[in-house]
Amino acid sequence: MHLILPAGPEGTKAEYFLQQKFTDENCANSSLTGFGYEMITAKLDHIQCKLTAIELAMNEDRKRFDQKLSTAVSQLSETIGRNLTALSTQTNKMLTEETANANHERMRDEIQMLLSKQDPAPFMVTSGLNLHSVSFQSCKTNPSKRSGKYLIQPSENHEPFLGYCEQSSFGGGWLVFQYRFNGSVDFDRN
């Protein structure tokens, strides 16, 4: 049995207070006794057991995940270390090759300069140097982009000769055999 007293403008504050107190006491008394209470308590215990089992399973999963993650990070770290070592070795090898190529180019240019100042025949005899290593098959195969005198040897069977390679005009790679620089020389002469 509930006693409901009006609250608000028709009722007094005391009546409202009594209504609240009476309702709260009835709810407390009715919920703490009987079969319903036992059933709710059993369900809460069951839910508590389920939550504990879930928490334990999550902790186990977290441990397995942490172990797998640790192993994966360790393997990745080792792989990165090996790759960095290989990259460093390859880079050092490439730098060594570039340095050797630059030295080879510089030596070739110096030999070309020496040969352009003198006749190549005595140089071949006195030095014993294989001029094929410093000569070019044609001006087109000369990697230098500077015009100038270069040693040309069309094949190993031909003797090398000194020729002027034009490397800046008309795409480069041209052997100059007549050069008109001011128009005063007639090319049609005998």
Image: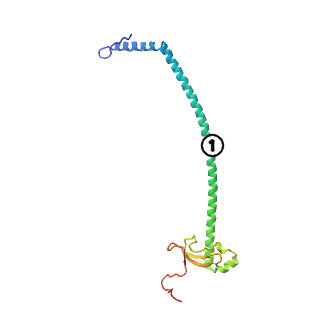
Q: Position of residue 85 (x, y in %)?
A: 64, 52
- Residue at the spot 63% in from the left edge and 67% down from the top edge: 103
Q: Position of residue 153 (x, y in %)?
A: 62, 76
Q: Which residue is mark 1?
A: 74
- Relative to 8, is 34 on the left or the right? right
Q: Could you tell me which secondary element the residue under label 1 belongs to?
A: helix
Seen from the viewer's position, the closer of residues 73 and 99 is 73
- Residue at the spot 61% in from the left edge and 79% down from the top edge: 161
Seen from the viewer's position, the closer of residues 180 and 14 is 180
- Residue at the spot 64% in from the left edge and 59% down from the top edge: 93
Question: In which quarter of the view is residue 124 placed?
Answer: bottom right
Q: Is residue 89 above or below residue 166?
A: above
Q: Is residue 85 above or below residue 180?
A: above
- Relative to 27, is 160 on the left or the right? right
Q: Is the residue marked by circle 1 packed among few (<14), some (14-19), or many (20+) residues within 10 Å? A: few
Visual colour scheme:
rainbow
Seen from the viewer's position, the closer of residues 50 and 133 is 50
Q: Quadrant of the C terminus?
A: bottom right
- Identify the residue at the far left of this view: 10
Question: In which quarter of the view is residue 22 placed?
Answer: top left
Q: Quadrant of the N terminus?
A: top left
The amino acid at mark 1 is Ser
Q: Position of residue 112 (x, y in %)?
A: 61, 75
- Residue at the spot 51% in from the left edge and 15% down from the top edge: 38
Q: Is residue 114 above or below residue 38?
A: below
